[in-house]
Image: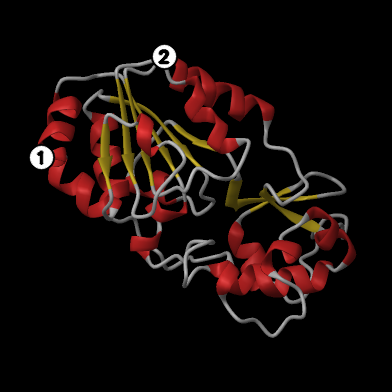
Amino acid sequence: MSLDKLKQVIDSSDNIVFFGGAGVSTESNIPDFRSADGLYNEKTKSRYRPEEILSHSFFVSHTGEFYDFYRSKMIYLDAKPNDAHIALAKLEQRGKLKAVITQNIDGLHQMAGSKEVLELHGSVHRNYCMSCGKFYPVEAVVSSKGIPRCTGCNGIIKPDVVLYEESLNSYVLEKAAEYITKAEVLIVGGTSLTVYPAAGLVQYFRGKHLVLINKSPTPYDSQADILIKDRIGETLKKVVS
C-alpha cells in the first residue's frame, strides 16, 4: 500500500527533493557508518577509533595514519550507481526532482546522471593543496604513498570532505535548506537522521508529503506521510518506472 501511495505522490508532483545518507550507497557495496556491520563497528589494527581518525585534529597531527585509513576505508573507485541513484537521475531528467541533497562523498549520484547534487560533506573526487590551492583528482591521492604532496609546492593535499570538528559549507547548507523549504515532496532515504546539522534540514520542510525510506527507525518516523522500512534502491526502482 505504501508503495502505491509513493508512486502516486511521485507521479503527481514536479517539485520533489531527495535527501539521502549512507544507506543510499550500501547497495553499491560501500559500507555505512553506524549499522552493525558499518565502518564504526569494524575492528581495525589502529589504536584509534574511526571517529577519531576522521577528525580535523587527527588529520593535522597524524596525517600519514589518516591517509592509511582514508585510502582503505573511504574511497571506493570501483563502486557503481545502484537502483536508487539511477531512479533519482531519471526523476530529475523528467523534471520532477529539483535536487539531490546527499551526505555521501562518493560521487555516485553524478555518475548516475544527476546534475543538481548538493554534497553536504564534500567529495573524495575533489582534493586540494593546503598551501597553494592546486586541485587534484582522487587518483592523485590513491596512487600516492604516505602523505600526498603537491607537485607544485610540496604542500599537503587534503580531501575536500568535511571531517569531524569542521563546519559544513554554509553556501551548500543554505541552498539545501532553500530547496527543502520550497519542495512539495521531500523523500528522505538511507539516513538515520541523527547527525547534525544535516539532520536538522528536515525541519525546513513545509510541503505536502514527507516520505521516509530507511531500514531502521528515525526520529522523524511519526511525522512521515509515507514510511517504508526497506532497501531504498529496491523501493525507488519499483515506483520509478
* Residue 182 image label: 2
- Residue 154: which quarter of the image? bottom right
User: In the drawing, does residue 1 fall left or right of residue 203?
Assistant: left
The image shows residue 193 at horizontal and vertical percentages of 50, 43
Residue sitting at x 74%, y 66%: 53
Relative to 27, residue 182 above or below: above
The image shows residue 180 at horizontal and vertical percentages of 45, 22
Q: Which residue lies furthest to the front in this view?
A: 222
The image shows residue 81 at horizontal and vertical percentages of 34, 55
**Number of numbered discs visible in the structure rendering:** 2
Q: Name the residue under label 1.
A: 1
Relative to 175, residue 132 above or below: below
User: In the drawing, does residue 8 fall left or right of residue 121?
Assistant: left
Mark 1, other Cα within 10 Å: few <14 / some 14–19 / many ≥20: few
Q: Nearer the viewer, residue 206 or 68?
A: 206
Residue sitting at x 76%, y 44%: 166
Mark 2, other Cα within 10 Å: few <14 / some 14–19 / many ≥20: some
Residue sitting at x 73%, y 76%: 145
Relative to 36, residue 55 above or below: above
Does the CB distance between marks 1 and 2 fall below 8 Å? no
Q: Tell me which amino acid carries mark 1.
A: Met
Q: Which of 43 and 134 is in front in this view?
A: 43
Q: Is mark 1 on a helix, strand or loop?
A: loop
Relative to 208, residue 88 above or below: below
| Separation of residues labelled 1 and 2 (CA atoms) | 27 Å
Q: Which residue lies furthest to the bottom in this view?
A: 45
Residue sitting at x 10%, y 39%: 1
User: In the drawing, does residue 91 fall left or right of residue 220?
Assistant: left
Q: Is mark 2 on a helix, strand or loop?
A: helix
Q: Tell me which amino acid carries mark 2.
A: Lys
- Residue 47: which quarter of the image? bottom right
Return the disc, 1 or 2, that comes first in the chain's sequence. 1
